[in-house]
Image: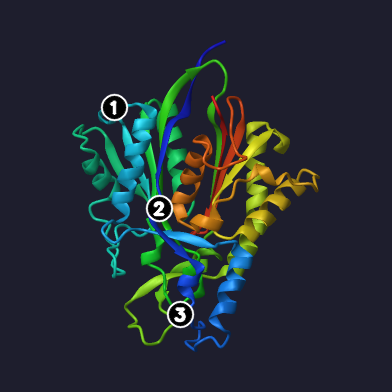
Amino acid sequence: MNKKIYSVITGSGKYLPSQIVENDYFLNSSFFETTGEQKNKPVGDIVATLQKITEIEQRRYAEEEYVTSDMAYFAAKEAIASAKVDPETLDYIIVAHNFGDIKKGTQRIDIVPTLAARAKAKLGIANPYTVAYDLPFGCPGWIQGLIQADCFIRSGDAKKVLVIGAETLSRIADPHDIDSMIYSDGAGAVIVEANSSEKAVGILKHISRSDTLEHADLLNMAPSYNPAYPDDSLFIKMQGRKIYEYALSTVPQTLKEVLDKAGLQITQIKKVLIHQANAKMDYSILSRFFGLYGLSEVPMEIMPMTISHLGNNSVATVPILYDMVVRGELPGHEIQPGDYILFASVGAGMNINAVVYKIP
């Protein structure tokens, strides 16, 4: 058989901030309606309801002295050590994020120079042909970076690519919006390398879609719900119910499409590593996904969950989840050579993507 070039993850790393924020942290908050009126419901009931729906009990916030590019660097350094590669041999550094470096106490977005350039500098890489660039693609950004790395490698343009997902959502969240309790901070990274093999391994197939005509504003930037804030203070805003409906109507079929492209059945998938913003939504997506194959029973161990203690850290969710699984940090979840896993995400855009991956 002739050998082909495949894209294989050879190392991974993550950075989880040390600041753990429990739900009790929000009990002294004042939440407002979209109309600018303060919510009448007791804050304790609001927090309890959110926990019931999302399963979030705690989340991580970045330490005061760090920004997103710092966390990207920490995760990258760990991934490079894990893969045992010389960073000077990297062909690309791709950093997925959405808001750049935001310093504590501000909402000012800083994206020049790129976070990838900053991460490269922090890594001390002198090679001018290690191309560093950013990828803003909503929560699916890290998976999209993985897809681009695969394209570079298969084309022969690259042999080693560092793909990072990092975000500090806590610093761009409106403290008077109940959705602020969902967001968290963190970073995850992988090294993707070219692998010559007679058998298909690594990234097998991928899919991406963008629905912008009717769904672009489901996640956007807008002033605080609290009228006391100046109008030029913009925060991340989302229409939760509409996002939920969009995800359930589009994500399961998109995941089936990528499995069909790979010639696989859902029963062959060992793990589904999916972006986590709402546990209820993820369970519903998985149930509908299995339903497309005529299956009513869903093996819940197929979908490792971290949202209860890590919250929604956007582009960092999936790479952190992958790193935790391969390092054996999630009891009951492990992957072995030959296993098929599915990376999946949905987020601002609205964008959806997925990757079918075979463990070498």
Mark pair 3, 2: CA separation: 25 Å
Q: Secondary structure at mark 3?
A: loop
Residue 251 is left or right of residue 329, and the answer is right
- Number of the label disc, if any, that sits on residue 60: none
- Number of the label disc, if any, that sits on residue 28: 3
Residue picked out by circle 2: 186
Residue 21 is left or right of residue 291, and the answer is left
Amino acid type, mark 2: Gly
What is the x, y in percent for residue 104? 29, 65
Quadrant location, the C terminus:
top right
Residue 267 is left or right of residue 313, and the answer is right
Residue picked out by circle 1: 86
Mark pair 1, 3: CA separation: 49 Å
Q: Is residue 103 above or below residue 49?
A: above
> Residue at position x 49%, y 36% from top?
327
> Residue at position x 61%, y 72% from top?
49
**Residue lying at the far top of the rendered structure:** 1
Amino acid type, mark 3: Asn
